[in-house]
Amino acid sequence: MQLFSTLSRIREPFSPPTDRPVTLYVCGVTPYDTTHMGHARTFIVFDVLVRYLRRQGATVTYCQNITDVDDPLFERARRDGVNWYELAERQIAQLRADCADLNILPPTFAPRVSEEVAIMIPIIERLVELGHAYVVDGNVYFSIQTDPDFGRMARMGYAELLSIANQRGNNPHDPNKRDPLDFVLWQRGNPDEPKWESPWGLGRPGWHIECSAMSIRYLGEQIDIHGGGADLIFPHHSCEIAQSESATGKRPFARIWMHVGLVWLDGEKMSKSLGNLVFARDALQMHHPDALRWYLLSEHYREDFDYRREAVARYEQYAADLRHALSLTGGTHSPLDVSRGRSDVITSMNDDLDTPAALASLHAMAGMIIDAAAEGRDVSTAQATVRDLALMLGFTLRDK
């Protein structure tokens, strides 16, 4: 199998290890405004990856975190006049229900930041001890000048890195910083935010250290695959690399970095600020989960995806054709052979998870079964093959 790594910008060979599980970490949600189609697409892509690797005989240990200690959550709680923890609880319950309805397998581990803070403190202490971090007035910052390769995955100049970081939560005017791009490892926080004891006083962790700590705890200091949305390439994942490799002294932190393209709505970027989110729970009221899965996998995962509500109907038909093909009773002569189609699906999956090509082959095989059954041919073996492939891709194959 070959997987494109954002860090190297090439397809890299990936063979599951034989002496241990494949280790996969995917950045999960900050629990507010869940579960929108950007979340759904990302989690469906990695669901397919996990299913495929397991079908090929690999054991996969999959960790997907919940960022329930973060500025956007606290800001939403303040806006709505609710307790941040209660808001997080409701949103996490919604996320789990939506993922179950979309037939997304639960991860092996789903740690919540609020329950994992204790494991972050020793890593921060180690970074300070090694000179990669500094303490100012109860806040701890990572010094990017100590990592010559900082931001290498983003492949941008300093000015562009700073501009993007500022759009995504960085405060370049913090007077405690040595460099505007230095990022927070520990912060004192605001009075209405949760706080934990630390060597630097009461406070809470910064966003980036949270994922490094949970990945190291549940999967080890070096992992096989780290994934998430493309908007996490910088600063989040770049900061993870810097602090993880600096703390452990081991490179690479992740062997392959996989990033899923962003979701747009009718030609506009789907975002909380624009208020044009499409939520899974609403889409599931109108569409079969198999149709939504087929639609969200119909473009290559690395490409941005333009979600158009009227387009889903076409994939309703594709999903219906698949169920129809598997429900037919054929005859007893001239057994239908779909082994070539099966081989095409596997070849596509091995080519950087090319689900559009795999689904095209699956749809073609469904059509072959429908035609062969009408001719009285034996389609039972072909149906078993197609059913197996469909389940591998995460389709429920059930009537809604």
Image: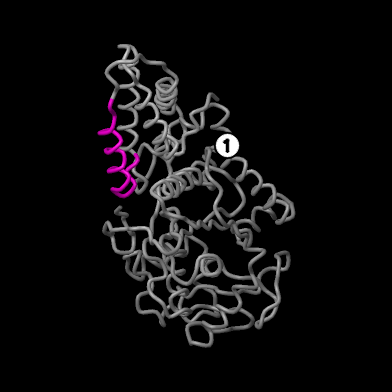
Q: Is residue 10 left or right of residue 255?
A: left
> How is the protein colored in the picture?
one colour
- Range covered by the magenta-colored residues: 337-355
Label 1 packing within 10 angstroms: few (<14), some (14-19), many (20+): some
Q: Is residue 245 left or right of residue 63?
A: left
Residue 134, percent from left and from top: 53, 84
Q: Is residue 200 left or right of residue 341?
A: right
**Count of number-bearing discs:** 1
Residue 264, percent from left and from top: 43, 41
Residue bearing mark 1: 101
Question: Residue drawn at (37%, 58%), measured in percent from left and top?
Answer: 16
Image vertical order of residue 274 relative to residue 170, above or below: above
Question: Residue drawn at (54%, 75%), measured in percent from left and top?
Answer: 174
Mark 1 is on which residue type? Asp
Q: Quadrant of the C terminus?
A: top right
- In reply to whether residue 154 is colored magenta, the answer given is no
Q: Residue furthest top?
A: 375
User: In what element is the residue under mark 1?
Assistant: helix
SS majority, magenta: helix
Residue 343, percent from left and from top: 27, 38
Which corner quadrant of the image does residue 322 belong to? Answer: top left
Image vertical order of residue 39 relative to residue 170, above or below: above
Residue 31, percent from left and from top: 61, 52
- In reply to whether residue 341 is colored magenta, the answer given is yes
Image vertical order of residue 294 relative to residue 84, above or below: above
Which corner quadrant of the image does residue 196 belong to? Answer: bottom right
Question: Residue drawn at (28%, 58%), measured in percent from left and top?
Answer: 13
Which corner quadrant of the image does residue 17 belong to? Answer: bottom left
**Residue situated in front as seen by the camera: 76 or 225:** 225
